[in-house]
Image (cartoon, rainbow, N blue to C red):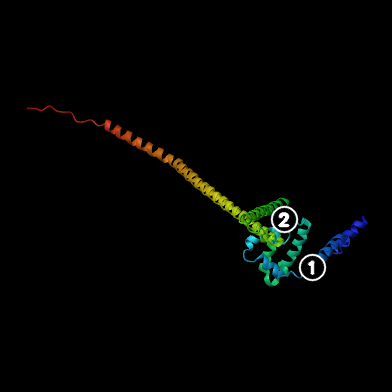
Amino acid sequence: MASGATSSKSEKNGDFTNPPQKEELFNSFYTEVKEIEKRDAVLTPKQQIERLLRPGSTYFNLNPFEVLQVDPETTLDDIKKKYRRMSILVHPDKNQDDVERAQQAFEIINSAWKILECEETRAKCLDVIEEARVRTDQMLAEKRKKLKKDGKDSRIEEDDPDKYKHAIYVRTMKLFADMERKRRELANRDMEERKRKREQEIEEEEKATTEKEWQKNFEESRQNRVESWKAFQTGKKAKKAKGMGFKPPKHKAESR
């Protein structure tokens, strides 16, 4: 009981001696941040921001592996480490002279990490890269076959590992771009369909409101019509009765 009271009193006075784990975690994180900053000193924040916002970045950044500059085979733990290093480099707080662009770069990096962090979306990205590799191999095989058929040397520039990797990179970018184009087309089509349905709903709502108002006015004017009809019928009967009470003069015989 006394121990609990002492702990409560210490917390109230701001002396958090009880949970040393929090302080250790903070110190560990702070140390890691400093190590990251030191290790990546050669990769300046400005260079990363320029890379992520370069012309055509809308399409380059569709590939999260390209954004974080990691190979598809990289483990998730290593991807996370790279993400943390890059997010620290481009963080707006670290780039006060270019806050707006730093914020954009920071959001791009976060988006890439969210895609790769999720097992399902990461698998889809890996499928795209594998398809790019298969298509590239098919294209190169056809290229060699044509050279051989023409009696030429069947060696091609993509036999160089770096150029082969670049060919896959280009194909990958095109596939991601095609996916994004189709996604936008579907989104626009869906938006147009939802707009059309909404316009139809509004039209039907306006029609229902008009019919409701007409019915209301019709019901409200019913009594007036009934009273007018009764008055008309009463006047007609009165006129007929008056006509029946009239007696024409008797015809007198002519005297000679």
Assign a secondary structure to mark 2: helix
Of residues 58 and 13, the one drawn nearer to the viewer in this rendering: 58
Q: Which mark is residue 93?
A: none
Location of residue 236 by image quarter: top left
Res 39 label: 1
- The type of residue carrying mark 1 is Arg
Residue 173 in the image: state x and y as whole percent. 65, 58
Please name the residue that numbered disc 2 is placed on. 116
Q: Is residue 111 visible?
A: no
> Residue 122 location, x and y as percent?
71, 53
Res 165 → quadrant: bottom right
Q: Residue furthest left?
A: 256
Residue appearing at x 44%, y 41% in the figure: 218
Whether tag 1 and tag 2 are in contact, CB under 8 A, the answer is no
Q: Position of residue 6 (x, y in %)?
A: 90, 60
* Residue most extreme to the right: 2
Residue 116 drawn above or below residue 225: below
Number of residue marks = 2
Above or below, 84 against 138 in this view is below
Q: Position of residue 95 (x, y in %)?
A: 71, 70
Asked where in the image residue 80 lies, by quadrant, the reply is bottom right
Looking at this view, is 98 or 85 the one in front?
A: 85
| 224 w.r.t. 32: above or below | above
Amino acid type assigned to the residue bearing label 2 in the image: Leu
Q: CA distance from mark 1 to mark 2?
A: 23 Å
Which quadrant would the C terminus be assigned to in this image?
Answer: top left
114 lies left or right of 143: right
Q: Residue furthest bottom?
A: 97
